[in-house]
Image (cartoon, rainbow, N blue to C red):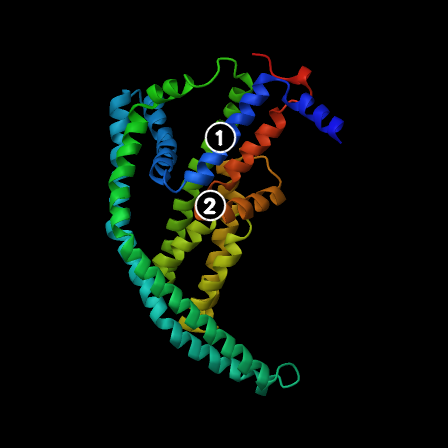
Amino acid sequence: MKKLLNTWIQRHFSDPQVIILAFLLILGATTIFFIGDILFPVIAALILAYILDGGVSFLRRKLKIPKVLAVIITFSIFIILLLSVLFILAPLMVRQASQFVLQIPQMMAHGQDLLMQLPNKYPNIISEKHVLELVSSLRLQAADFSQHVVSFSLSSVADVLTFMVYLIMVPLLVFFFLFDKRKMIDWAKKFLPRDRALVSKVWEEVNIKSAGYIRGKFVEILLIWFISLISFLWLGLDYAMLLSFMVGISVLIPYVGAAVVTLPIAVIAYFQWGFDSNFMYVIMAYGVIQFLDGNLLVPFLFSEMVNLHPAAIITAVLLFGGLWGVMGVFFAIPLATLIHAVINAWPSDPLDAVDS
């Protein structure tokens, strides 16, 4: 066993570049795992700057705008969008969410009446005892949900000051990261060995695919959100802003998000109209949006960008989502791309190691 272990170590870690790559991966993972919460403003600013840098590059490359002006234009658009979200969209969605929570007891009562009719309609399939047990379980879950809402509201009040601090710090960091990008990269390179061809190879592949994926996913969320909002408003569906936002965010979880969001859309449409034509129009519109997203928008935005098996994507979403929540879900595919790039670049034999 010891001989096999020594052979494996000599085979995979005898090259200095492999050791450098392994050290950087372990250092990055350890930093995020142990002090990721403390560095959240910095990490969030880096992510936003990474997304916005595409706009800066576009202005400089296509329109020949000087760097300083390109950064100012891009950052100004970002601030306008941020203020719009904070003062227009967020209050509207909070108001709709509050209205929805207030209607939950009424929906529960209506649902209970429907369930109590099942034993009379289908006596051979379901009994009144089973219905009463189901109703009791639903009541307990509704009470538990209400407690979570109250505790979340109280904790949110306690975190208002932290949010305000982040609201000032993160945009400032984004501006500095955009403006001094080259200086910061050159400074970071001073801590890396000059012989880092393997690291550069992995970073080049991850950067190309991840940059396109993150920016493309951001565009996909906005487009699906906007299209869903227009469709739901046109059909007269209640809570259109809240539901369209859920539809937009659902694209973060491939293959699963669309199925999960179908339930609240169907429930609200049913309690608003029942099983009539309006209900069917909403379901059909949602189905068309999902069809266009999967067969038109996603191939256009992500063609040849992420070459991962669907099973690997779902596993990455579950793993990184469980570790880091929503942020883990958003970056599950880029992180899976990183692992894929490392596996591809990792030499199986010292002779296969990348030459500097």
- The residue singled out by tag 2 in the image is 324
x then y, percent, for residue 349: 69, 20
In the rendered structure, the answer to whether residue 272 lies left or right of residue 89 reads right
Q: Visible in this render: residue 333? A: yes
Helix, strand or loop at label 2? It is helix
Indicate which disc, 1 or 2, sits on the residue closer to the N terminus: 1
Q: Is mark 1 in CB contact (under 8 Å) with mark 2?
A: no
Mark 2 closeness class: few <14, some 14–19, many ≥20 residues within 10 Å = some
Helix, strand or loop at label 1? It is helix
Q: Visible in this render: residue 74? A: no
Q: CA distance from mark 1 to mark 2?
A: 17 Å
Q: Quick one: quadrant of the C terminus?
A: top right
x then y, percent, for residue 184: 35, 22
Which residue is at the front of the view, 165 or 88?
A: 165
Looking at numbered disc 1 in the image, what kind of residue is underneath it?
Leu
Q: Is residue 302 above or below residue 66?
A: below
What residue is shown at x 46% (from left), y 68% (from top)?
Answer: 267
What residue is shown at x 39% (from left), y 50% (from top)?
Answer: 225
x then y, percent, for residue 197: 54, 16
Q: Quick one: quadrant of the N terminus?
A: top right
What residue is shown at x 50% (from left), y 80% (from top)?
Answer: 114
Q: Which mark is residue 27?
A: 1
